[in-house]
Amino acid sequence: MRAATDRSILRRKLAYPILTLCVAAAVYFFSRGQLGTQAPAKPDDYLGFAREVFIEVRAGRPIPKAIDPALGRVFEQLAPAAVRDPAAGALTFELAGPVAPGAGLPHVQSVIVRAPDGSGVGLSISILGGEPEVVGVSRVDPIVPAPTEAVP
């Protein structure tokens, strides 16, 4: 018969609760996004995906990888014609940063797309696990050229 102070008995009694606690913690942290399995997306990834979106949109196709088909209708209402029309000229793309900095969603970034006339639209892009998606569309204020003063 073994003594009550045998360490192997104590180890067996504590092994399953400790293992269960570790697995539960790992599941919790993975579900909250606090443990990542892939490196976060780079700014160039967001800009590159925005360019792909506008290649499709300017060709007359719907927004690729939109999380909801309703985004296409919202885009049609918010995006100026100069942004949607390929004959309007080259577009400029600017990464505006996180959509909601306090919400803990660093994988959702906003990209502002402008036409040569200053009109534009914002795309909220999520890149999580290497999969890009368009999660939102927003209106942006047009850039109005500064007034020039007449020199006497």
Image: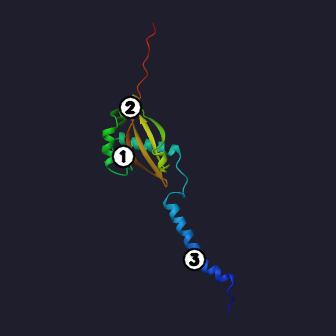
Which label was assigned to residue 119? Answer: 2
Give the class, few, some or many, for how many residues have Cα within 10 Å of label 3's Cα (few <14, many ≥20). Answer: few
Q: Residue at label 3?
A: 16
Identify residue for label 1. 63
Under mark 3, the amino acid is Tyr
Question: Can you say which quadrant of the picture contains the N terminus?
Answer: bottom right
- At mark 1, the secondary structure is loop
Give how far apart the Cα atoms at labels 3 and 1 are. 50 Å
Q: Which amino acid does label 2 sit on?
A: Ser
- Vertical order, 120 against 124 (above or below): above
Q: Nearer the viewer, residue 82 or 79?
A: 79
What residue appears at the point 62 percent right and 81 percent down from the top-left corner?
Answer: 12
Camera-side residue of 92 and 9:
9
Q: Whole-Å distance between the Cαs marked 2 and 3?
A: 61 Å
Amino acid on which the number 1 mark rests in the picture: Ile
Side of 134 where 29 appears, left or right: right
* Residue lying at the far bottom of the rendered structure: 1
Label 3 sits on a secondary structure element that is: helix
Q: Which of marks 2 and 3 is in front?
A: 3
- Tell me: 62 left or right of 47: left
Q: Position of residue 108 (x, y in %)?
A: 46, 48
